[in-house]
Image (tube, rainbow, N blue to C red):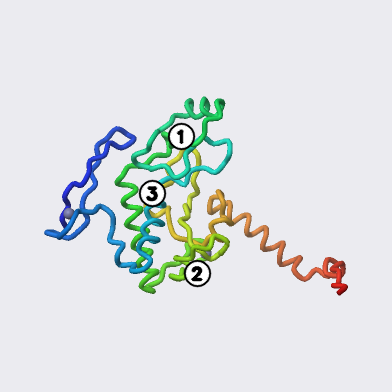
Amino acid sequence: MCNKIIKTITNPFGEEEHQYCVKEENHKYVCRFKEDYSVFDDDKTYVEGKIYNMAYSTAGSTASNSPILNRASRFSPPRVISKQEEIRLKEQQEYRVGVRKTEVSTFEQCKKVEVDLYNDALSIYDGDGCDCPLCGVPITWEQFTSRDRTDGNSVQGCHLDPLEEGTIQHYVGNVKWGHRDCNQMQGDRSIQDMEEKLEVMLSHIRKIKNEVTRRENKPTIQW
Ligand SMILES: [Zn+2]
Ligand SMILES: [Zn+2]
């Protein structure tokens, strides 16, 4: 490995961190801290963007009453804000300004997430298998590269222990590729809450699926 320091960053905790080159020793051309995305051929730009967004930036909050910036850097935020400041900004209706102090990550944590997501993407690409962490069904490359946001089988980064205000849930192993449908079904439930919800729904659905009274009310098409 080249291991040359490309850049030194002061992370949100005030510590200095280095971005090291991941290319082989004595490589040609410029150094690079990101993994090698050229292996994904025609999909390289898409895959790099997908992984980079997931590993290095926040999901943000789409809630209209949240001042938290959508897609802010997790390790080198444009602005780290405290709870007091967040409350003040909310009162002034100043939105989209930074990342919460309690939710920032170090560059090293983000890099580990990148490597893990990269390796899983490579397994999907090579057909070696990588299962959705929620339904357990293997993810296909077609699903992984689907740009169709209405496609329930398209693939998103999922936080298994869901993002929760005030806690760092962004760490290797907790961020995995999963189906959009599966991720949306989980929402911000914990795995245990999801199990309870699904058990209640499943036993109920099994009871009502063959219910005849509902069917009898179904209108017939007149033309
Ligand atoms: Zn290098
Ligand atoms: Zn799934």
Of residues 84 and 172, which is closer to you in this image? 84
User: Mark 3 highlights which residue?
Assistant: 171
In 3D space, how far apart are the residues under numbered discs 3 and 2 (Cα atoms)? Answer: 23 Å
Instruction: Find disc 1 in the rendering and name its residue.
Output: 97
Return the residue nearer the eye: 142 or 14.
142
Residue type highlighted by circle 1: Val
Q: Which of 195 and 166 is in front in this view?
A: 166
Q: Element under label 3?
A: loop
210 sits left or right of 132 in the view? right
Q: Earlier in the sequence, mark 1 or mark 2?
A: 1
Quadrant in which the C terminus is drawn: bottom right
Q: How many marks?
A: 3
Neighbours of disc 2 within 10 Å: few (<14), some (14-19), many (20+): few
Label 1 – label 2 distance at C-alpha? 38 Å
From the Cβ of disc 2, is ligand 2 less than 8 Å away? Answer: yes
Residue drawn at x 39%, y 39% as measured from the top left: 104
What kind of residue is marked 3?
A: Tyr
Residue bearing the label numbered 2: 137
Name the residue at 74% across, 68% down: 209
Q: In what element is the residue under mark 1? A: loop
Name above or below for residue 129 compared with residue 68. below
Classify 10 Å Cα crowding around label 1: few (below 14), some (14-19), many (20 and above): some
